[in-house]
Amino acid sequence: MQYAANSLENHWMPFTTNRDFKSDPRLMVKAQGLYYWNHKGEKLVDASSGLFCCAAGHGRKEILEAVTAQMAEIDYTPHFQTGHPSSFELARMVAKITPDNLDYVFFCNSGSEAVETAIKIALAYHVANGEGQRTRFVSRERAYHGVNMGGVSLSGMMRNREAFGAVMPGVVHLRHTWLPENRFCIGEPATGVELAEDLQRFVDLYGPRSIAACFVEPIAGSTGVLIPPKGYLKRLREICDKHGILLVFDEVICGFGRTGKAFAAQSFGVTPDMITMAKALTNGALPMGAVAVSDKIYNTVVGAAADGAVEFFHGYTYSAHPAACAAGIATLKIYEKEGLFERAAEMSDYFLDRMYALKDIKAVSDIRGYGMLCGIDLAPGVRPGLRGYDATKRLFNRGLHIKFTGDAGICAPALVAEKSHIDEIYQIFREVFSEY
């Protein structure tokens, strides 16, 4: 596709250094498999699956064909008191791969909306259950739960909060799980389980009947891939069960095979009451998010409403859009047909071995990884974040796309990656990181 000459000025870009970007743009114009092509015709290996979305690789014709056929048949229908068959089929397919008893799926349009939806479901559940006083939420330092106001309130990343003072009240934060003694640990660290006791401290401080839900990313992804210590998630589950607190796993990044199973909940053997998801749900082809909800929550909320009444006053214009549902159905069929979750588990050792082989580089201060997800910290430069941004640009110019948060690079190649792709990513990392 050809584009007219453009100054780029009119688009206010998200999470971007707009002035610097527009002086030296990095425009992607084509994608296929594990690769992007920029506007200069140069090829780049995609080390972050876009933004952790394209788990089946770019340019999947199955998804294109499914969306095209759906749009030719029906372009849009609301899901307020009407519906479309595709949403029920996608919900069935999602429920099939979630942990047991998470059988109900509420669709939205992004991970941020999924978190907002889960917050409201938690509050609605407690009201329906006769415990409307449960309005407090527990999150975690260094957490990322999207950019809507509920998610920003849960956020434990300072730069995502500091400009938005009027956040939701009644949110407290557990300590994050990164510990200096766990540097360069592969998989779950052996130490740090005691950090889960922060939740019990909040119970003791605020009272067990005041807390609605505890939100955690099983693997804290956006902050730089913090793997939970052994036993940490199980201890959170025990405390929640004891005190009637809902446990919500935000799996927007680590869901859909990234950990070697459909969801990290299954990899770590802990079943939450809700799972938020998005990104790889449609392989990034169209915006979509969802919340998988336990049977108990759904039945309680629905059962509390009067006959003929709307049970849950929440939803979006584009909830379960037919085109997005078509993309989701096609995506889940690819995952199953090609065994991509199992493939991720098989490829993980090779991937992590190559990533951890970077530990000898002077500028690399820590590496953390699990499944097909790895965080690589660079020692800060003049001020935190500058080196990470500089590395982003250098890597792009060497033919590699990656997402950095501050000085932490987040490597998450598509689950269709071959060893040769991982070797290519490793070699470019080594060359660029060795320059610092």
Image (tube, rainbow, N blue to C red):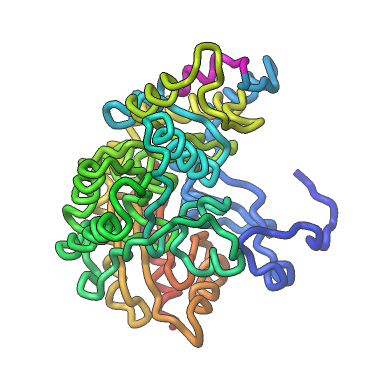
The answer to which quarter of the image holds residue 44 is bottom right
Note whether 177 is above or below 294 in the view shown. Answer: below
Instruction: Name the foreground residue: 195 vs 282.
Output: 195
The answer to which quarter of the image holds residue 172 is bottom left
Main secondary structure of the magenta stretch: helix
Q: Residue at x 66, y 31 (%)?
A: 317
Q: Quadrant of the N terminus?
A: top right
Q: Is residue 16 left or right of residue 265?
A: right
Instruction: Name the foreground residue: 105 vs 242.
Output: 242
The answer to which quarter of the image holds residue 226 is bottom left
Q: Position of residue 169 (x, y in %)?
A: 50, 57
Instruction: Name the foreground residue: 210 vs 7.
Output: 210
Residue 311 magenta-drawn? no
Q: Position of residue 283 (x, y in %)?
A: 50, 38
Q: Is residue 22 left or right of residue 65?
A: right
Stretch of the chain drawn in magenta: 81-91
Q: Residue at x 59, y 16 (%)?
A: 83
Q: Residue at x 27, y 56 (%)?
A: 199
Q: Position of residue 124 (x, y in %)?
A: 46, 34
Q: Quadrant of the C terminus?
A: bottom left
Residue 352 can be seen in this image: no
Q: Position of residue 61 (x, y in %)?
A: 55, 30
Note whether 178 is above or below 119 in the view shown. Answer: below
Residue 178 can be seen in this image: yes
Q: Find the residue positioned furthest to the left.
A: 190
